[in-house]
Amino acid sequence: MVISTLADGVARQIEAASDAVTGVFEPVVRLGVTGLARSGKTVFITSLVANLLDRGRMPQLVANAEGRIEAAFLQPQPDDLVPRFDFETHLAAMTGQSPQWPESTRAISELRVSLRVRPNGLLSGFQGARTVHLDIVDYPGEWLLDLGLMDKSFAHWSAEVLERLQGRDEAAEYLGLVSAMDGGADLDEPKAQALAAAFTEYLHAARGVGYSDCTPGRFLLPGDLAGSPVLTFAPMAAVEKPGRRSMWRTFEKRFEAYKAQVVKPFFRDHFARIDRQVVLVDVLGAIHAGPRAVEDMRGGLADTLAAFRPGRNAFLKRLLMGKRVEKILFAATKADHLHHSQHPQLTNIMQALTREAADRAQFAGASTEALSLASLRATVEEAVTHEGRKLDCVRGRLLEDGRQAAFYPGALPQDASALLNPAKDGAEKWLEQDYQVMKFAPAANTLRPGDGPPHIRMDRAAQFLIGDML
């Protein structure tokens, strides 16, 4: 184990030195894109790339506004063992006359966009254009949540999860099954598989109703690990002096194997190399689901953003070896589901949800920003008079049946604490409003030459993330 750790450290130092030499001539920015379930990672990356290739809708990207970006083009991703992000298929699904939302992120993927940029400043006339590479890494937010497991024992994790499951209808079947299980008895593999399957079903149901605390992440997205022992464990009540062959001891060993063989390699091979990070959040979906979902999201974000506080995590501190994420963008997605007059409130809620994590990241030297955006605008704004009151609505094509409909979701509060305080206090429902969410399909678009897909504030996001490199 010691030799393996030392070898990993030496390999990371050599790789960092190689990246530094390359970056002197052609700077490389590795941008990580993640988010909790249904936050729109695939749509965000597709829109960002399309709008960098065709920049007619990117006025707030300063290098573009100044006319200094001469060209942008796709290149093969540098990591031969990482699947390519299927940009062309996703863009075709999102645009055209019969658009659809693309398939969601289920595994890690990567794409390189290269931009040919003229320098600015006093010496710009004496320097030629240079190439800046943007390597975009897409990975499921469920995997990032697993970071919180690294410093926990199986007993600690089990106690936390079982306490959290109390009172959740989605967990009733699993709680009944695990309560009847004797963790001190010898391992019975069919019973172990049944328990793991029931826990996995709970995780899918919990994610479906808006909960964010759905770990271990690979239970939801197992890939080629499906059915393996490393995914065949589940939380259970502590057992005093469990035997070596007991169910408890076996689950404990598998939990440790999951951390060592699944979680650690992901952070070592991918996350540790990220320069800048986007964290996408479906804030509106959580608000619609109620106070418990909002508080759960706040906790999930805190766990997710622990990845950007290496000083608090001994595992990450050893792994990153002084490297840290330089910029973090916290983005509330689906801003097009609200009239623009409510976008400041949505941004305020995003800021409040991530305030503690952002403060810690800034203290560690990272720049942070929160904003509300829509990667692909699916609605138009419309004023509707209802019962003598003028409502600022949005109109779009409904996902379920394709009908056009105007929608008013309810007024978000000016003060984010009006939502966050009831959530922290364990309120069952909102007292002032019944917030609604409508699912819109992408709007039909015929893109003009030079224009990327319509969006809200993607140019601001790009300026914050890579503007300084251009």
Image (cartoon, rainbow, N blue to C red):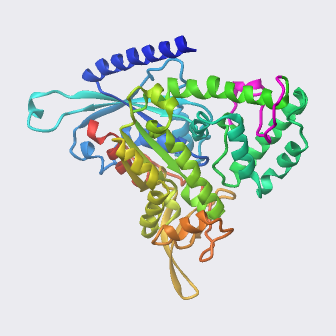
Based on the displayed image, in which of its 4 quarters is residue 252 positioned? Answer: top right
> Is residue 54 something that shows in the picture?
no
Residue sitting farthest toward the front:
241
Residue 434 position in % (x across, y down): 63, 72
Residue at 43%, 40% (x, y): give it: 277
Quadrant where the N terminus sits is top right
407 relative to 20 in the view: left or right: right
- Could you say which is closer to the camera, residue 67 or residue 296? 296
Q: Residue at x 48, y 55 (%)?
A: 377
Horizontal and vertical percent position of residue 309? 45, 40
The tally of labels here is 0
**Relative to residue 5, is residue 155 depicted above or below?**
below
Whether 146 is among the magenta residues is no
Q: Main secondary structure of the magenta part?
A: loop
Q: Vertical placement of 35 versus 399: above or below?
A: above
- Which of 45/394 is in front? 45
Q: Position of residue 31 (x, y in %)?
A: 42, 35
- Between 219 and 257, the one lying in front of the other is 257
| Res. 200 image quadrant | top right
Q: Which residues are magenta?
A: 221-244
Query: Which residue appears at 84% of the width and 26% of the height?
Result: 243
Residue at 63% x, 49% y is: 212
Image quarter hosting the C terminus = top left
Q: Examine the structure image and report whether residue 230 is included in the region drawn in magenta.
A: yes
Of residues 20 and 341, the one nearer the viewer is 20
The part of the image, by quadrant, that contains residue 324 is top left
Locate residue 121 relative to residue 136 in the image: left or right.
left
**Residue 335 in view, yes or no:** yes
| Location of residue 10 in the rendering, given as x and y in whole percent from the top left corner | 43, 14
